[in-house]
Image (cartoon, rainbow, N blue to C red):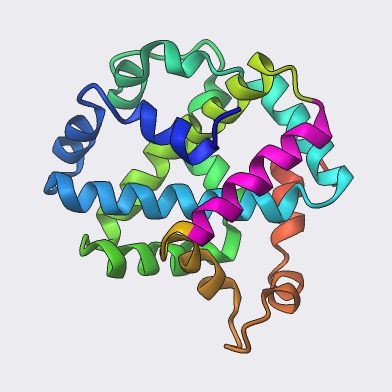
């Protein structure tokens, strides 16, 4: 099974990166850097959530309900606004981000902005555009490989680990959550309520 980061980057081929660059009015190289940062940060966030069986099961439910991967059938059309989904939750990027990143969204935007050189408004636009695609890739991969909640958790956590080991991208999310600068994100995750935010997205109360 491929790494999720590889699968996400594969979706950016065929002119999609150029399309996104035009949409936000930015050079393609900077857009690429921002996209990589967003992918890495979201995968790290998902990895934290699926570290518990409850979180993994909740994500399974969200994927089954709203993110079956059909967005990938015409990704350029969906992301460009030329095509509308039957299930509006599939494209609710703002809603996804509200629950996935919560209070960390601003810090993540600032970090990716600094890393890529793009202003925060462009990063925010990319975030809302890419969030549905990320969920769609994960949903399609789950279905194609007939993954149960444990397999899904392994896929996401393994993908996040690879991101963190391969480049500085993974450090973006870690640095945001490690608010007190002690190098330990576990206490900061608890304080920021990231798991509860994920829970609301994935159907947990």
Residue 141 in which image quadrant: top right
Residue 53 in which image quadrant: top right
| Percent of width and height locating residue 108 | 45, 64
Against 22, is 38 above or below? Answer: below
* Residue at x-position 61% and y-position 54%: 45
Against 163, is 2 above or below? Answer: above
Of 148 and 72, nearer the camera is 148
| Percent of width and height locating residue 201 | 69, 42
| Percent of width and height locating residue 65 | 70, 21
How many numbered marks does the figure carry? 0
* Residue 164 is inside the magenta segment: yes
Magenta segment main secondary structure: helix
Task: Left or right? Give the position of 157 relative to 132.
Answer: right
Against 160, is 78 above or below? Answer: above
Q: Write the start and end of the magenta stretch as one range.
A: 148-165
For the N terminus, give its image quadrant. Answer: top right
Against 146, is 108 above or below? Answer: below
* Residue at x-position 23% and y-position 36%: 20
Judge whether residue 203 can be spotted in this image: no
Task: Left or right? Give the position of 154 relative to 6.
Answer: right
* Residue at x-position 29% and y-position 62%: 120
Of 122 and 145, nearer the camera is 145
Of 32 and 135, nearer the camera is 32
| Percent of width and height locating residue 165 | 52, 60
Judge whether residue 57 can be spotted in this image: yes
What residue occupies the far right of the structure in this picture?
Answer: 53
* Residue at x-position 30% and y-position 22%: 81
Of 87 and 139, nearer the camera is 139
* Residue 186 is inside the magenta segment: no
């Amino acid at each position: 099974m491929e790494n999720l980061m590889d699968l996400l980057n594969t979706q950016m081929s065929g002119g999609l990166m150029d399309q996104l660059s035009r949409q936000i009015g930015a050079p393609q190289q900077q857009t690429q850097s921002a996209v990589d940062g967003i992918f890495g940060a979201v995968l790290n966030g998902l990895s934290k959530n699926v570290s518990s069986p409850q979180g993994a099961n909740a994500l399974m439910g969200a994927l089954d309900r709203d993110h079956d991967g059909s967005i990938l059938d015409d990704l350029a059309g969906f992301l460009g606004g030329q095509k509308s989904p039957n299930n509006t939750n599939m494209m609710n990027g703002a809603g996804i981000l509200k629950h996935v990143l919560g209070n960390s969204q601003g810090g993540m935007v600032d970090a990716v902005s600094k890393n890529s050189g793009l202003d925060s408004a462009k990063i925010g636009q990319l975030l809302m555009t890419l969030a549905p695609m990320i969920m769609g890739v994960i949903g399609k991969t789950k279905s194609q490989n007939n993954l149960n909640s444990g397999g899904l958790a392994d896929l996401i956590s393994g993908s996040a680990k690879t991101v963190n080991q391969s480049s500085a991208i993974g450090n973006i999310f870690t640095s945001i959550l490690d608010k007190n600068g002690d190098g330990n994100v576990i206490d900061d995750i608890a304080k920021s309520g990231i798991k509860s935010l994920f829970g609301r997205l994935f159907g947990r109360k």
